[in-house]
Image (cartoon, rainbow, N blue to C red):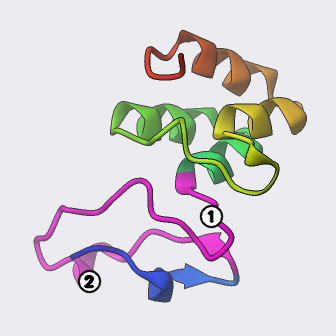
Amino acid sequence: MALSADSVNNNVWEPPKLESLNGHVDISVDITVNDGRTPLRAAATNGLLDVTLHLLGNGGSVHITKKRNWTAQLAAAYSGHVEVFHKFLKHPLTW
């Protein structure tokens, strides 16, 4: 079961309810809303370090961009989340 635009509410990504998965685990961590935001970008922009690390550890792409061609790492820096930004620097797929 892949996530779709139906899983997005008011342009804020929300995970599906566990009971709606029916045993399926093929959920992409790189689902995007209409303007190209991913869960990784949302977590980084909002300074959610644990969520950012979880998404990175589960294959979240550090290369997806949206307007301004900013990655999640740049969004974290612009939003003032220095600790999140530094975790991207240590992540092997960032470079």
Expressed as whole percent of the image width and height from the top left, the position of residue 89 reads 62, 13
Indicate left or right for 44 with 74 as reference. left
The answer to which image quadrant residue 70 occupies is: top right
Q: Which residue is mark 1?
A: 36
Query: Which residue matches tag 2?
Result: 20
Q: Earlier in the sequence, mark 2 or mark 1?
A: 2
Q: Is 64 above or below relative to 47?
A: below
Residue type for callout 2: Ser
Q: Secondary structure at mark 2?
A: helix
Disc 2 + disc 1, Cβ < 8 Å: no
The answer, for residue 31, to whether it is visible in the render is: yes
Instruction: Point out the frontmost of discs 2 and 1.
Output: 1
User: Is 14 above or below relative to 59?
Assistant: below
**Is 25 on the left-hand or right-hand side of 73?**
left
Residue type, numbered disc 1: Gly
Q: Please, what is the dominant secondary structure of the magenta stretch?
A: loop
The magenta-colored residue range is 11-39
Q: Residue at x 74, y 46 (%)?
A: 69
Q: Measuring from the top left, give residue 53's x and y in whole percent.
A: 49, 31
Residue at the spot x=63%, y=76% of the render? 34
